[in-house]
Amino acid sequence: MAEVTVENLTKIYGATRALDDVSLDFADGEFFGLLGPSGSGKTTLLRAIAGFIAPESGRIRIGGVSVERLPVERRDIGMMFQSYALFPNMSVADNVGFGLRVRKVGRAEEARRIGEALELVQLENLGQRRPHELSGGQRQRVALARAFVTNPRVLLLDEPLSALDKSLRLDMQIELKRIQREIGITTIFVTHDQDEALTLSDRIGILRDGALVQAGPPREVYGRPGSVFVASFLGEANIFDAEIEAGKLRLPGGGFARLPPGSEGAAAFALRPESIEIGPAPGPEADGFEAILIQRVYSGPVSTLIVEAGGDRFRATVKDTDLPDLVEGVPIALHWDPSALIPIPKP
Amino acid sequence: MSAPWLARLGKAWLGLVLFFLYAPILIMALMSFNASQYYQLPFEFSLDWYRALADNSNIQSAALRSVLIALLTTLIATLLGTAASIALFRHEFRGKAVLQVLLFPPIAIPWLITGTAMLIFFFGIGLGRGTPSIIIGHVALALPYVIVVVTARLASFDPLLEDAARVLGAGPWTVTRRVTLPWILPGVIAGALFAFAISFDQFVVSYFLAEPGDTTLPVLIYTSIRKGFTPEINAISTIIIVFSMGVMLVAARFSNFGGGR
């Protein structure tokens, strides 16, 4: 186990900067999620830490030791691939034991550790199967066991759950978190699934165009996005331009909203769709506006309302049972608690 | 839905193809057991021609030389070809596309021309004719086939498996031995069989490069036929066919090539 430090990492492919001066610290034992749209550089960062990609400049330290000059096989890393990359010609036990055999730990020790690892991922009876005889979830567990059985200093997971069905994915999220806690290994994982990132991570980092945009605990990044990009990328957000009149935010369609604390110098304001409630604002001061209902999208427990005001479209997510019978095309009133408005600082 | 008559037609066609392929071979094999030198019927079983073969040291030494040359060619061409295929698969380098394109034309160049060119070349560099020249020539002929077959097998290989093995601590040689080679083994075996067949079967290039009195079996058979055909040739040919088909059947059983996987 060790902490990982990335300093000013830059990787250039032709004219694009796949990594643009990225600096990040991953604490010992931390579960860190790298999140970003495709092409944002998150996988490049993971592969640079693993050693598959040689960066143009910058440093990578594992446990305080610089590893840029170490080849992949000597970095002592565990890595799980999106497609799992299980060796098709080997049994489950031989897959898991591959790293141990390469390290020449001895037959008895090897068998013992394979057994322990398979037990931890709850596959103790399937050691003699071949990968093609396993289900997707079982393969994922084998790949995970193979990655941590050598007690690597850091575990890298590339889209670890994206190949699974949605229902299985939720179970595996809980599993993955349990196993990571149990062995206490520093884990860095790449995902494009924001729910997964929010659920699993102690901290998340958001990348865009090769640069790190924001890093922090999920609650903090979700609640205090540092930019319009982060606000709209992580979860959904309605964005209001910062048009301030007499200490209040001017809303589309003519309404006004009270400003939350820390609004000085804000570039814009974000409002989560789930913070919006239907109906006129209670009390004398109105934090809301009236808009035309364009579409009502039913999705089980909640419905999403798409509304239009002042030429812009906004979204509100409301518990379906709270909704009156609304006809598309009618004006509806929306309001929210003043603390729900999130000021976004100037870049 | 295919009509039953269509299925019957298909079977008949398959039978016809097999007959076309095997009838001449079967007749030749039968005649090698016929007592008459002039293919006279009725058939009269005899092992005379095989006995004659046992006394013919020319044919024996040529056969031995052919087998040795074919084995050496197979070994060298398979090693070089497999290594080249893996290198072309793993690495990007300047001129790779040109190199890959240049690998194929030798397959299409007539052996007669290749043979002439090799003869001129080997005399030019002072090696001349002889067994070493034949081996080098055969390796050159077989190499493109090995590379084509192994590369085709590599196309279905997931390069991430090599990444996975490296992360687990395996150096380049271990990765090749434990992960890459097991996957491409059927292709390597098929490539080796091609190499063996090309060398063992090779007449044109061998004819150019063989020294008189130091010939390979195909060259010897050719020169014997010109002097006068004897069923001895049928006998040696039958032995070769049984041997080659045996090798092919065993290889097909183990490598699964031509179907499955």
Image (tube, helix red, strand yellow):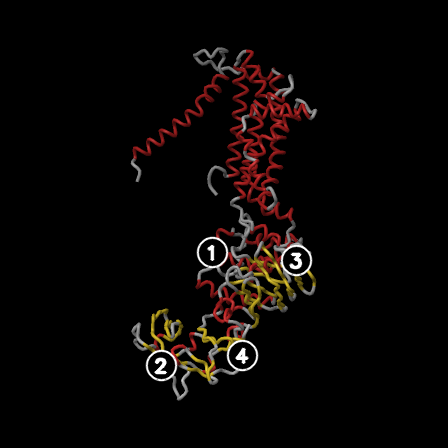
Q: Which residue does the numbered mark 4 point to in the structure image?
A: A265
Mark 3, secondary structure of its residue: loop
- Whether marks 1 and 3 lie on the same chain: yes
Element under label 1? loop
Query: Image point 45% across, 70% down: which residue?
Result: A236
Q: CA distance from mark 2 to mark 4?
A: 30 Å
The residues bearing labels 2 and 1 have C-alpha atoms spaced at a distance of 49 Å
Q: Are marks 1 and 3 in contact (CB under 8 Å)?
A: no
- The label number, if any, that marks residue A75 in the structure image: 3
Q: Name the residue located 48 percent from the left edge and 54 percent from the top edge.
A: A134
Task: Judge whether B209 appears above or below B39 on screen.
Answer: below
Marks 2 and 1, the one that precedes in the sequence: 1
Q: Are marks 4 and 3 in contact (CB under 8 Å)?
A: no
- Badge 1: chain ID: A
Reading the image, the residue beneath label 2 is A279
| Mark 4 Cα-neighbour bin, 10 Å: few <14, some 14–19, many ≥20 | few
Residue type beneath disc 1: Ser
Residue type pointed to by label 4: Gly
| Above or below for A66 versus B183 | below
- Image: A276 above or below B72: below
Q: Which mark is residue B79?
A: none
Q: Chain of mark 4?
A: A
Amino acid type shown at disc 3: Arg
Callout 1: 10 Å neighbours few (<14), some, many (20+)? few
Of the numbered discs 2 and 3, the one sitting upstream in the chain is 3
Point out the residue furthest to the bottom here. A284
Q: Are the residues under marks 2 and 1 on the same chain?
A: yes
Q: Which residue is mark 1?
A: A135
Q: Do pointers 2 and 4 mark residues of a single chain? A: yes
Whether labels 1 and 4 belong to a single chain: the reply is yes
- Please identify, in this view, whether the residue under mark 1 or under mark 4 is nearer the observer: 4
